[in-house]
Amino acid sequence: MSGAKKYWIGLGVGAAFLALFFLTTDWDRLVDALADANYWYLVPALLLYQVSVLFRTARWQMLLRHMRSISIARLYPVVVVGYMANNILPLRIGELVRSYHLGEREGVSKTAALATIFIERVLDALTLLVFVAVIAVFVPLLAVAEGFGDRSSVPWPALAAAISLPFAAAFVGLLLAAYAPARASRVVEAMLRPLPMALASRGKPLADKLIHGLEALRSPRSVLAMFLISAPVWLFDAGLFFAIGYSFDLHLAYDGFVEMAVAIMLVTALSNIGASVPAAPGGLGLFEIVARETLVLLPLAEVDRSVAAAYVAVVHAALILPMIALGQIFLLMESLSLGNLSRAGQRLAEGEGEAQE
């Protein structure tokens, strides 16, 4: 499938979810909620999110250490540019942009860098699932699970398994490949053997570099450290959700600080897991639906669906728009173009440009 077709499919999926989001919202009440919000809370919200991005940068620094020691100050702009690309381009093309940009900027293997980004995504999902599991011990989440099951016409146990098992399986697979790289290389070689020689010859070096990027997982201490640093990544991310909750007086709907914090943490976890599906830019549409329905379905408080929709729309805008602006500033400072980085990253994904590494 051509890049253009993938692009339009991603946009189409996002547009469909976004249309569903707006069609199931009372527009008049949504506009009223937006008009009544106190937007001064965006200031601490955005600061908390930047702390989260700094923790993400520190974690990526750990994942790249076996290739090259790179300062957080040099990695941070690359992370921001990658997030900007994910917020503008569909199908999480920003991951390719980030790996290519890092390779050009720091002289490391672009393909190995892409493997470290994949580890990040799996770590993020597992960390969020741990948060959900801990919350489930104290809060009855059956109503939330059944609600999503009813809306998706999929039994909630199957839905829960579909969300969690692929990430757990991916992490186990990554660990096995990291601990036995030679065996993993032979497995890949056997899988490539039935393919035409031209494809197999390009796929084997690509796979070897991907496996090399997993080296950070060979140390149990490093794996533990990466899980530990993933916790503040998402706690500060949830801080943005929490601060903006005060903009819409959500704290008045809950009995106390703890109840609201638990609800916001669950909204953060489920919406980001949902938005990790490689489709629309920034998870647009799916993020809004999952976040809104989680807030409405939780038994901790009664939150109006339209108010929840307004809240979620502002949260997503706060996550996306500042990173787009900041990423563009970094690109201008380096005289770079997102379009050129995107095309180069997609060529890398197709196995081209390996000779430059």
Image (tube, rainbow, N blue to C red):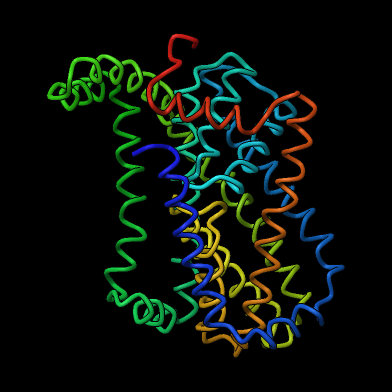
Residue 34, picture quadrant: bottom right
- Residue drawn where x is 51% and y is 63% of the image: 15
Q: Is residue 179 left or right of residue 348?
A: left
User: Which quarter of the rendered picture does the N terminus lie within?
Assistant: top left
Residue 58, picture quadrant: top right
Residue 145 appears anywhere in the view: yes
Please state the horizontal and vertical placement of residue 63, each as a whole percent of the image.
53, 30
Query: How many numbered marks, from 0 up?
Result: 0
Please state the horizontal and vertical placement of residue 65, each as a whole percent of the image.
56, 22
- Residue drawn where x is 82% and y is 67% of the image: 41
- Residue drawn where x is 49% and y is 11% of the image: 357
In-front residue for pair 303/285: 285
User: Is residue 96 positioned above or below 130 on the image?
Assistant: above
Residue 126 appears anywhere in the view: no
User: Is residue 92 positioned above or below 340 on the image?
Assistant: below
Q: Residue furthest left?
A: 194
User: Is residue 79 positioned above or below 296 on the image?
Assistant: above
Please state the horizontal and vertical placement of residue 204, each as a whole percent of the image.
28, 18
In-front residue for pair 312/17: 17
Q: Is residue 271 left or right of residue 47?
A: left
